[in-house]
């Protein structure tokens, strides 16, 4: 293949039409064109439409997300993507209510205090647990460089109660995960940095606050820079729909890829119906699907992909008249630690976060059930899952009537779990990418489960191909 801008018209096949595949295809198209090259892009999607988990349904004035209800506005890659798509005007930021969050334990919904000082003064944890937490600055930093689980880190620095009642539910809320299984380095690299660089979390927060005061720039919490949850007027589906509309190549649905075979410097991509020949292939399907596709190409990479587990997560969306709900639902929502006699992991109060997501006079609850703690959820029927949510809505929020809007969305393999050993697995995939230039793996399975993680990695994919074509 020649590599001058005048003659280059590389063929690219993207496998998977979720946010990762769509954003990769769009950025390959856009960044190549800026360099005078028009690649021929074919996106193959197994389902009957694109979007993957990132899609939105609008019914009777209720705007219901299948998966992500937004992205945090602290990732420049996502904001760049939104700008390139001309979607900046469509952005909606979470209301002031979203900073109010609840945790349910010991029979009560408790508001999560927003600062360490307020935390110590609140009744959110027993006195002994708060005293243990206050010792965090004097807990020596771990400096052996070994990875540990999120739970072990939280218990070591902040105590067992904090790990059980605050960190584990947060991990369930973000990753549908089990804090005892997830790799700290893979899911919260910032926390590792805070400990190694500053000696602990509180010390890091104080130092960062001091720096922020000096430089006049905002600082964030242990999870990263301060950020606001952001969506679009018609929900997150607007992002995937616009990406699909902007693609000038072909989008072929009902097209499940079975295998990829390297052919010299090119690739053959095999579906049940036909084969495609491509100069570059982007696998943007989940890791377990990529494992099957690459089975005959590299057994080490296939094994690494197979070792990335996915947790099931079900979403029950119920719309209610305000007068049918006893609780005010005046915040982001509630997280429920395990062992509290509830099966739901938590509930998002969509209309408090984004007021346009329910008609005036109504609430929209999105309750999550399942996750790594509760894999058995997959064996239940839709109505059984919905019944669990409805029963728990009655107990938690004093719901008095049947919902006026209802939807159950099942994700049997919903969210990739970055368990211990995740980073070496990703390194194995990077080795394969080096051995087979033009083959790339992206998506929520590898370098970030969030929409932001997918957007950032889509830029890596597009820039890698530009470098491969010597256009960078
Ligand atoms: C319930 C839920 C809530 C979430 N909430 C948030 C949130 O609030 N904020 C946030 O940032 N993130 C959130 N996430 C995570 C976010 O949804 C994911 O990061 C993102 O959707 C993953 O995109 P993806 O393209 O990697 O995968 P997917 O969206 O899963 O897309 C993969 C696509 O590949 C296709 N495919 C699979 N196999 C093949 C094959 N063999 N051939 C062709 N196509 C194939 C699939 O059909 C699918 O369309 C949430 C996820 C879930 C499930």
Image: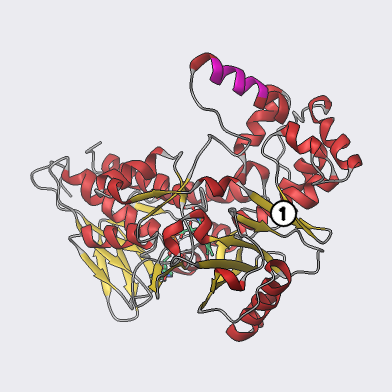
Q: Report x, y in % for residue 93.
A: 43, 47
Task: Say if 408 sits above or below 55 in the image.
Answer: below
Task: Say if 308 sits above or below 50 in the image.
Answer: above
Q: Secondary structure at mark 1?
A: strand
Q: Is mark 1 within 8 Å of ligand 1?
A: no
Residue depicted at 80% across the width and 69% down the height: 341
Residue depicted at 60% across the width and 67% down the height: 367
Task: Say if 298 sits above or below 323 in the image.
Answer: above
Magenta span has 211? yes
Magenta span has 366? no
The quarter of the picture where the C terminus appears is top left
Q: Report x, y in % for residue 62.
A: 43, 70
Does residue 62 appear left or right of residue 420 in this picture? left
Q: Report x, y in % for residue 347.
A: 62, 63
Q: Report x, y in % for residue 354.
A: 46, 55
Q: Identify the image's colour scheme: rainbow, by chain, secondary structure or one colour.
A: secondary structure
Camera-nearest residue between 238 and 152 = 238
Does residue 319 appear left or right of residue 377 in this picture? left
Where, by quadrant of the figure, is residue 439 drawn? bottom left
- Camera sees residue 25: yes
Residue depicted at 58% across the width and 45% down the height: 99
Check disc 1: other Cα within 10 Å, few if <14, some if 14-19, many if 20+.
Answer: many
Residue depicted at 51% across the width and 79% down the height: 404
Does residue 325 appear left or right of residue 355 in this picture? right
Magenta stretch: give its range: 206-213
Q: Residue furthest front?
A: 323
- Camera sees residue 283: no
Does residue 36 appear left or right of residue 19 in this picture? left
Q: Determine the main secondary structure of the stretch shown in magenta.
A: helix
Camera-nearest residue between 370 and 398 = 398
Q: Residue furthest top?
A: 214
Q: Which residue is mark 1?
A: 103
């Amino acid at each position: 293949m020649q590599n001058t801008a005048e003659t280059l018209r590389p063929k690219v096949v993207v496998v998977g039409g979720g946010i990762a595949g769509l954003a990769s295809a769009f950025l390959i198209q856009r960044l190549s064109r800026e360099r005078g090259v028009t690649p021929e892009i074919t996106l193959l999607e197994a389902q009957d439409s694109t979007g993957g988990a990132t899609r939105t349904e609008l019914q009777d004035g209720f705007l219901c997300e299948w998966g992500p209800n937004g992205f945090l506005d602290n990732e420049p890659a996502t904001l760049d993507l939104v700008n390139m798509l001309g979607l900046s005007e469509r952005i909606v930021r979470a209301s002031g209510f979203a900073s109010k969050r609840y945790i349910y334990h010991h029979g009560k919904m408790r508001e999560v205090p927003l600062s360490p000082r307020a935390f110590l003064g609140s009744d959110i944890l027993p006195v002994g647990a708060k005293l243990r937490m206050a010792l965090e600055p004097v807990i020596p930093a771990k400096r052996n460089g070994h990875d540990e689980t999120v739970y072990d880190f939280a218990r070591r620095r902040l105590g067992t109660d904090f790990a059980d009642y605050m960190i584990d539910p947060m991990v369930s809320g973000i990753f549908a995960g089990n804090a005892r299984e997830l790799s700290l380095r893979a899911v919260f690299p910032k926390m590792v940095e805070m400990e190694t660089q500053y000696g602990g979390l509180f010390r890091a927060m104080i130092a960062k606050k001091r720096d922020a005061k000096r430089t006049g720039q905002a600082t964030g919490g242990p999870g990263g820079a301060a950020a606001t949850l952001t969506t679009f007027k018609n929900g997150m589906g607007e992002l995937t729909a616009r990406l699909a509309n902007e693609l000038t190549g072909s989008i072929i649905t009902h097209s499940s890829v079975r295998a990829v075979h390297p052919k010299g410097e090119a690739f053959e991509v095999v579906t049940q119906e036909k084969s495609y020949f491509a100069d570059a292939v982007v696998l943007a399907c989940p890791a377990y699907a990529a494992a099957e596709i690459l089975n005959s190409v590299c057994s080490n990479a296939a094994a690494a992909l197979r070792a990335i587990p996915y947790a099931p997560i079900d979403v029950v969306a119920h719309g209610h008249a305000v007068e049918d709900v006893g609780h005010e639902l005046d915040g982001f929502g509630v997280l429920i630690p395990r062992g509290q006699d509830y099966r739901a992991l938590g509930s998002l109060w969509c209309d408090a976060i984004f007021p346009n997501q329910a008609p005036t006079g109504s609430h929209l609850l999105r309750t999550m059930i399942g996750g790594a703690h509760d894999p058995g959820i997959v064996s239940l029927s839709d109505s059984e899952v919905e019944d669990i949510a409805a029963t728990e809505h009655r107990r938690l929020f004093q719901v008095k009537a049947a919902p006026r809007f209802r939807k159950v969305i099942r994700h049997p393999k919903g969210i990739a779990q970055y368990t211990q050993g995740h980073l070496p697995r990703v390194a194995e995939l990077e080795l394969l990418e080096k051995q087979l230039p033009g083959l790339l793996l992206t998506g929520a399975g590898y370098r970030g489960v969030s929409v932001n993680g997918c957007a950032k990695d889509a830029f890596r994919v597009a820039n890698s191909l530009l470098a491969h074509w010597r256009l960078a």
